């Protein structure tokens, strides 16, 4: 029986549920169970604790291989695991790939499709509200690259959770003398909160401001108006990272797989 | 707040622990005020809680004239609870700390049609593996909650009423797992656990009544009334799967006809898909009873991606569920419903849309108040999390356990 490990860093104790991570886990479990393997997930508070878990798992041999999520630029976990000799597979952006097993997601390509959806509808000033995680900065960079290439006026704003988060940043954006006609939020939660703020300011969606969420979820569907979003491929990504890991464990070779591109799920908010 | 704790109560200690837990950060003076006990009693009880490592001092509060009071807090990492969801398709174990926060989880193959004693042996082994993987000492585990499908008898053994796993009927899960693992085991219906799991993550005020519809292989419903699971005469309330939807419908294995489960559960959906041989072939459906949930997942995933034939099948199932939920909401006057369980993992958004639209337009009390429906955020894990909550509550706050009969 082989056990695959996944460590999630959650700075504050919460039971908060992340639809994307849980979709990935679900797809991964499906692949592992078919191969008579198990998935163990461990929640820790910081990245130092994460490394300590890998060290402990390696010593006790309690886990045979691990899956890395939320890769950062020059992620130190990669060298750490290679040194320990623990097989792993990562979920990575195309720009983060290296000589290791991974399922690659093309954030730049997805951003291109998202922006095209808005510029096709005549939007010339768009703001991207980024999120806390480092992957969000990759998406923000892709957004700015699209603005430069596509000739629309694009800005990135990062909400400060301590200063009112999505609500406050939405108010600031719309208080501008020349406010944008479209706002892209990096996650479904911020998009739903931003939508409420926009309506509270007496503006209409999509008449005055169009809203797009990067991650689709039921929250986008249940919002009024429903929110246009990038399709959620988390389950497929989970299955692919599982396949990549199984291949690595079996052959010892780095295995790269590509996630299918997300597409725009068009709803009432654009 | 009413002073409710008598000094002679044998459960005083656990009640004080619960006050500290629900209060977050509290002082001894706060505890005297809310409990009605004397300062001397509180000092003594807090001392024993601290010596057992369950409570720690975290600093000082604001002075109200005299010495600044010392603040107390639950020592969340001092004890752990395990929750297991005993499901056909996958076994999910969660471990939470004393505050109910998720520490880790393990997922392995489901129980399928495996002989129950074999499953118990595997669970015992996997519990050991998981605790090693999480670096948790066995002695720090307060108990193991198990969420399972089916009828319970008065002794707490699950009489698992399932077509796919008849061996579990009359199998005493609690006793077998206690003997094998050495842990105290608590058994609760999976639907009730899913509702408790929702409650436990703190999204719902304790005063608000709600129901959680849980779909795995079968369909059940957990009802939370005034902050506790509503059990009925024998802790078996919530069998919405056997609500009769069509009086002339197909025979149900329970003896009735046209039960919700016969019309809407994964088996019904898979059977309809198998009748369409073109669809069945293109999806690669196996049609084997042991592959039922995999087959259902294939249909649900194709529906989520827009395959028209599969969308129609899922919508049909959702339509039956919506009708049952309208009846439930009308009967109990509910204003909040959750959809939870692995049955909603792949096509939850289709179920959600149909059920929401029908409740919006057909619930009897819609002109008085809306009936909110949500897909559970704790989704797939809700039954296991709820089972862990049952273990925590039963072990650490026994003054609460009256209603559940565990």
Image: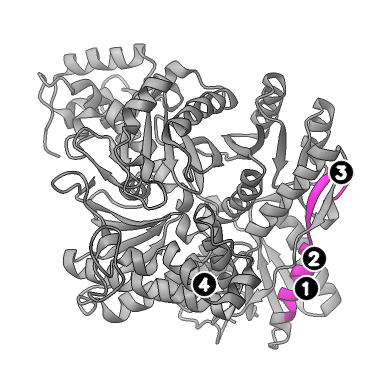
Residue A168 showing in the rendered view: no
Q: Is residue B84 magenta?
A: no
* Residue A131 vs residue B264, the one in the foreground: B264
At label 2, counting other C-alpha atoms closer than 10 Å, the crowd grade (few under 14, some 14-19, many 20 or more) is: many
User: Mark 2 to mark 1: distance in Å?
Assistant: 6 Å
User: Circle 4 sits on which residue?
Assistant: B273
Which residue range is magenta in the image?
A97-116
Q: Which mark is residue A50?
A: none
Secondary structure, mark 3, is: loop
User: Circle 1 sits on which residue?
Assistant: A112
Both marks 2 and 1 on one chain: yes
Circles 2 and 1, Cβ within 8 Å, touching? The answer is: yes
Q: Which quadrant of the rendered structure holds the N terminus of chain B?
A: top left
Secondary structure, mark 4, is: helix
Residue B32: percent from the left, percent from the top? Answer: 18, 25
User: Circle 2 sits on which residue?
Assistant: A108
User: Mark 4 to mark 1: distance in Å?
Assistant: 38 Å
A103 left or right of B327?
Answer: right
User: Circle 3 sits on which residue?
Assistant: A254
User: Mark 2 to mark 3: distance in Å?
Assistant: 24 Å
Against A53, residue B376 (above or below) is: below
User: Mark 4 to mark 2: distance in Å?
Assistant: 39 Å
Q: To which chain does the residue with label 4 belong?
A: B
Residue B242: percent from the left, percent from the top? Answer: 26, 61
The residue shown at (24%, 64%) is B243
């Amino acid at each position: 029986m082989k056990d695959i490990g996944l460590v999630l860093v959650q700075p504050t104790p919460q039971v908060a549920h992340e639809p994307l991570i849980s979709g990935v886990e679900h797809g991964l479990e499906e692949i592992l169970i078919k191969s008579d393997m198990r998935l163990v997930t461990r929640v820790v508070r910081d990245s130092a604790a994460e490394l300590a878990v890998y060290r402990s798992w390696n010593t006790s041999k309690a886990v045979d291989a691990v899956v890395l999520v939320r890769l950062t630029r020059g992620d130190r976990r990669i060298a750490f695991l290679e040194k320990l000799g623990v097989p792993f597979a990562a979920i990575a952006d195309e720009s983060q790939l290296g000589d290791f097993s991974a399922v690659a997601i093309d954030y730049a390509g997805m951003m291109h499709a998202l922006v095209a959806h808005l510029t096709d509808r005549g939007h010339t000033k768009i703001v991207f509200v980024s999120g806390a995680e480092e992957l969000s900065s990759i998406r923000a960079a892709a957004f700015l690259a699209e603005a430069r290439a596509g000739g629309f006026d694009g800005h990135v704003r990062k909400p400060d959770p301590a200063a009112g988060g999505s609500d406050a940043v939405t108010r600031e954006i719309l208080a501008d003398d020349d406010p944008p006609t479209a706002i892209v939020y990096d996650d479904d939660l911020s998009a739903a909160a931003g939508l409420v703020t926009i309506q509270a300011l007496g503006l209409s969606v999509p008449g005055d401001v169009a809203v797009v969420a990067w991650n689709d979820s039921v929250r986008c569907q249940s919002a009024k108006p429903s929110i246009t979003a990038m399709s959620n491929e988390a389950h497929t990504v989970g299955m692919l990272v599982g396949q990549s890991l199984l291949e690595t464990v079996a052959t010892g070779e780095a295995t790269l797989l590509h996630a299918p591109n997300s597409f725009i799920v068009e709803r009432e908010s654009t | 707040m009413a002073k409710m704790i008598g000094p002679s109560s044998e459960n005083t200690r656990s009640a004080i622990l619960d006050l500290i837990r629900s209060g977050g950060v509290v002082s001894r003076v706060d505890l005297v005020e809310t409990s009605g006990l004397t300062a001397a009693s509180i000092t003594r009880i807090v001392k024993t809680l601290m010596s057992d490592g369950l409570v720690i001092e975290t600093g000082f509060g604001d002075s109200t004239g005299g010495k600044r009071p010392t603040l107390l807090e639950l020592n969340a990492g001092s004890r752990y609870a395990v929750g297991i969801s005993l499901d056909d398709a996958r076994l999910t174990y969660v471990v939470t700390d004393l505050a109910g926060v998720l520490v880790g989880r393990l997922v392995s193959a489901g129980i399928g049609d495996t002989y129950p004693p074999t499953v118990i042996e595997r669970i015992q082994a996997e519990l050991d593996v998981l605790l090693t993987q999480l670096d948790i000492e066995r002695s720090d585990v307060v108990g193991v909650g198990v969420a399972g499908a089916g009828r319970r008898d008065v002794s707490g053994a699950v009489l698992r009423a399932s077509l796919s796993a008849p061996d579990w009927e009359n199998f005493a899960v609690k006793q077998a797992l206690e003997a094998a693992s050495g842990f105290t085991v608590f058994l609760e219906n999976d639907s009730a656990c899913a509702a408790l799991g929702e409650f436990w993550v703190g999204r719902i005020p304790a005063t608000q009544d709600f129901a959680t519809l849980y779909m795995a292989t079968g369909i059940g419903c957990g009802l939370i009334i005034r902050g506790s699971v509503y059990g009925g005469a024998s802790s078996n309330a919530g069998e919405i799967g056997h609500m009769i939807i069509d009086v002339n419908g197909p025979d149900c294995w329970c003896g009735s006809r046209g039960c919700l489960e016969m019309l809407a559960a994964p088996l019904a959906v898979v059977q309809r898909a198998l009748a369409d041989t073109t669809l069945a072939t293109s999806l690669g459906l196996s049609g084997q009873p042991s592959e039922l949930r995999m087959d259902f997942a294939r249909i649900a995933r194709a529906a989520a991606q827009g395959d028209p034939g599969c969308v129609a099948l899922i919508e049909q199932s959702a339509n039956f569920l919506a009708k049952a939920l309208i009846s439930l909401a009308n009967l109990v006057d509910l204003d909040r419903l959750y959809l939870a369980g692995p049955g909603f993992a792949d096509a939850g958004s289709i179920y959600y849309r149909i059920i929401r639209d029908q409740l919006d337009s057909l619930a009897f009390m819609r002109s008085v108040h809306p009936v909110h429906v949500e897909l559970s955020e704790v989704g797939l894990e809700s039954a296991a999390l709820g089972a862990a909550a049952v273990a925590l509550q039963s072990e650490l706050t026994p003054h609460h356990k009256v209603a559940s009969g565990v």
